Amino acid sequence: MQQSRIYILAYSAILTIICGGLLAFASEALKEKQQANIEMEKKSNILSCVMNLKEGDDIEKLYSTKVQSYIIDYNGNKRTDMGINDIKIEKEYKKKHTERLLPIYEFKNTEGTLEYIVVPVYGYGLWNNIWGYVALKSDCNTIQGIKFQHAGETPGLGARIESEEIQNRFKNKTLFEADELISVMMQKGENQDYSKDPHKVDGMSGATLTAKGVNNMLKEYFQCYQNYFKKNIHN
């Protein structure tokens, strides 16, 4: 009986070591591919803010020919001492507004003319983090498109922020009134017509707190970028 117990313990320990080793090896072996997939998804999200992507589109080629990226500081000044891959938005989110480093993605047409500016946003919804990308027209004021994602909002309620129907409501809304940043606010309730209001968006029934999280996220990040926006509006 004693030998049997020792045998079981030894067998379990050896099996745990082997399985753990295999999992660690698989994780390390796939790390590069996982990172490449994350990077490809990010590029796809940035592009989809300003254009309709079709199945089979060469995301890498589209991104490399149309998008240029760089980092700015809170004052709107370009940082030349680092690249876009040197920062993580989720880490910058934990810093004070004035200390954050902020990515800028410029989308240009085939003639090289700036058409849109895409900025990442990051915040907290009802249950977990929410994030996304906002594309502005070259006036740095008018929203061309938005792409939201979430980690754990309620299916059928707050999770609707990922739907095209919700994201399309933000199109052509504006951030500023003269020099004052107003932002864009999703309203409480749903099925109201805000088409004539440049700063209001119809809400999501049953998802008031997620909508509040979206509003806070947008306002916070527009404030972080406003010095850059104002410089480009008036130039």
Image (cartoon, rainbow, N blue to C red):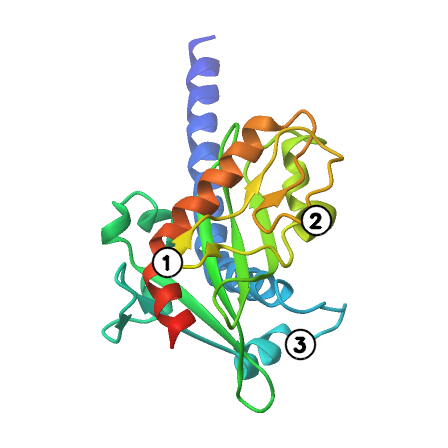
Residue 84's image quarter? bottom left
Q: Reply above or below: 44 against 220.
A: below
Q: Earlier in the sequence, mark 1 or mark 2?
A: 2
What residue did someone put label 3 on? 58
Evaluate if marks 2 and 3 touch, with contact meaning CB atoms under 8 Å apart.
Answer: no
153 or 28: which is nearer to us? 153
As measured in the structure, the alpha-carbon distance from the residue carrying label 3 to the one carrying label 1 is 30 Å
Circle 3: is it few (<14), some (14-19), or many (20+) Cα within 10 Å? few
44 or 118: which is nearer to us? 118
What residue did someone put label 1 on? 225
Decide if residue 34 is on the left or right side of residue 110: left
Which amino acid type corresponds to the residue marked 2 in the rendered image?
Ser
Which amino acid type corresponds to the residue marked 1 in the rendered image?
Tyr
**How many numbered marks, from 0 up?**
3
Where residue 87 appears, as percent x and y from the top left, is 33, 60
Q: What residue occupies the far top of the structure in this picture?
A: 1
Where residue 123 appears, as percent x and y from the top left, is 44, 41
What residue did someone put label 2 on? 195
Residue 127 visible: yes
Eye-nearest disc, 2 or 3: 2
Looking at the figure, which quarter contains the C terminus?
Answer: bottom left
Which amino acid type corresponds to the residue marked 3 in the rendered image?
Asp
Where residue 163 appears, as percent x and y from the top left, is 70, 46
Evaluate if marks 1 and 2 touch, with contact meaning CB atoms under 8 Å apart.
Answer: no
Q: Earlier in the sequence, mark 3 or mark 1?
A: 3
Circle 2: is it few (<14), some (14-19), or many (20+) Cα within 10 Å? few
